Image (spheres, rainbow, N blue to C red):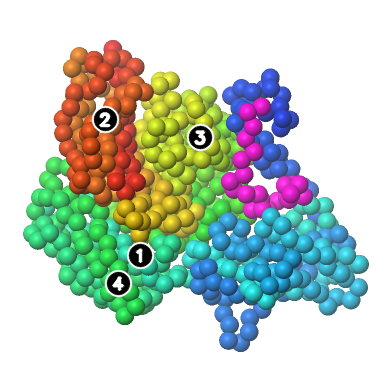
Amino acid sequence: MKALLGIKTRAALAFFMCACADDPATLGVPASRVDDLAPATAIWETVSSLNAYRPELLDPSDGGGSAQLVLLPDEDAVIQVSSPRTWTIDFTVGPKGIQVGGVIHLMPEPFWGWTQPQTVNPQRLGFTTASTEAEGVQLDSSAGGGLFLAKVEGRALLPGEMVRFVYGEGSGALSDRHSEAAARLWIAVDGDGDGIRKVLKDSPRIRVIAGPAAMLVAIAPTVMRPGEKAILHLSVLDALANRGVTEEGWLRLAEPEGFLKVQSEVKLESAQGGVIQVPFQALQAGTARVQVRFVSNEITLTCTSNPILVSDTLEQVLWADLHGHSGYSDGTGSPTDWFKYAREVAGLDVAALTDHDHWGVRFLDESPDLWSEINASVAAAHEPGKFVALSAYEWTSWIHGHRHVLHFADEGPLLSSHDPRYETPRQLWAGLSGLPALTFAHHSSGAPIPTNWTFAADPILEPLTEVASVHGSSEAADGAPTVRGSRAGRFVRDQLDAGMQLGFVGSGDGHDGHPGLTHLSPLSGARPRAADGPQAGSGGLAAIFSNKRTRLAVLEAMRARRTYATSGPRIHVVATLNGQVPGELVKPHSDPKFTVAVTGTADIKRIVLVRDGQVTDVNREPTGEPFFSGSFALPLGSWTAGSYAYLRIEQADGAWAWTSPWFAQAH
């Protein structure tokens, strides 16, 4: 493993690597330096490995050469998800050659399902070989950590000579679990054998297509006005929520008579890839859900849309996934496909792709071409009034915790956590000062690294925090399933107790290319056929109260903390404290009262009010239906300076929602 730590391509380092130690002295950091600049939660082993690479250490032969797939006449570079196949790659040595002791690396995309190469058992998946016809050259093959290595022995490989790799020889190797247009079989070259390698930008690409139809999803706006027209997003997806299913059939729609006007039947053609948008109209005030059935020769699927509240008075809710990853860091797929899924499948209003600044196969902070491509995808997806796409990235500090950075201009700077000028939260906020930008701490209570909360959140740049994602919840230990490795004192509620004023959002942090729908995947814990009814997996969405779909309007709403969080499903929540909405400063009052109205996607199990660290049940037993409303006296008496309160909702299907807190206004 040590040989892998000092290399440029960090994908062999597990994304979930967490060598957290309570005593940083065991990792070479003196205990006397455990302060805000060197917290005990920092993962120094990862910091050291990232610092080991310096561009000036690259040899001219590193990263040299070219590689291409070798396909039979009846083959193409297309495969269905999680399918076995043997792949042959011819590598041609570059103009600087490869010295004795140099190494050529083969690495299938390391994160999401490709079989790891192995050299032990030809009968097992992933068996990989390397060979050459170059006379006098021997290749010493080995595998580990997701890599196959071919070390050059005997004599140097000369420019133009070839090495053939066979990945999955015999039994094949399984492809990615997620569909994507250009999965990579990465080739990297350490030309001088010093342990520092560089990837080939043009490593072979493979198209991974969706599996059979297994899931039906229907998504509509949550709040509409009587007479308003909108789009119902209908998608037939495979078992892991991949788009691209080619099954043909009929979509049959039904809704409560009189509330909506929608087609009763729609034909889904194979060329549509399982995704279609159906126009409909709200007719009169009320709450409606559209029942959808997909029928083909092979399968019948059913689903119910999110609740649609038709009202003259309710404020519009914009749904946002503000945190996700593509294949440009440690996720799946292209930025373009990520935004298409966000808009066409998930029916989101706002989306921000947040690939890591310094993590993955190629790093954004070292690859201006990738950052430019991401921003080009943002520009192409953004359509004011209809869909808000944001330029964004993840500030990936293994010392102070991870934050995603959102820009609300056409484009913003990438201030890397690996740059000494921006390596602390305070430096990051200084670099963003005056810009239309926001930052968000996430998975703040635990793995892969907790947030260093000794840096109090900047009130302008960080008015919100992420309480739910695919990792779990960082809200509190007594609520939703928590982030792995959560630590006392690191939860968001601990920071509220300490006096921070933070609103709440959820975000997917999905790596599967499915923004807005991470909670549907069995890989995140979803159980659609559970004995006690469908169970939602981990995920996250931000609900933003805004009547405009523009970057400026979204920024203003978020800075005002006019948000709430869910674990993925589109639960509608409205609440007031003394007539004021969550996120606001509420004046002291001797007899405070709050109201709450919840329209869920499943039966409401429990609603609690959290005030100043104390949890009080609002409903004493499950409702048995997806509705709850009422007006109540605020527990613990008078509303006084320093107080905060928020609501937490739990559904019977394991989904959650959290309002942003109210905060007591100082005298």
Q: Can the viewer see residue 93?
A: yes
Is-magenta flag for residue 21? yes
Crowd around label 3: few <14 · some 14–19 · many ≥20 (10 Å) = many
Please name the amino acid that badge 1 sits on. Met
- Left or right: 174 with respect to 406? right
312 to 614, vertically: above or below: below
Q: Which residue is mark 3?
A: 486
Q: Which residue is mark 1?
A: 215
Lower position in the chain sequence, tag 4 or tag 3: 4
Residue 264: x and y, percent? 17, 70
Lower position in the chain sequence, tag 3 or tag 2: 3
Q: Which residue is mark 4?
A: 300
**Given contact means CB atoms under 8 Å apart, are the residues at marks 2 and 4 in contact?**
no
Residue at x 31% of width, y 35% of height: 648
Lower position in the chain sequence, tag 4 or tag 1: 1
Residue at x 41% of width, y 28% of height: 493
Residue 123: x and y, percent? 68, 72
Kindly report the secondary structure that dominates the magenta region of the rendered protein: loop
* Circle 3 SS class: loop
Q: Which mark is residue 617?
A: 2
648 to 321, vertically: above or below: above
Structural distance between the alpha carbons of marks 2 and 1: 35 Å
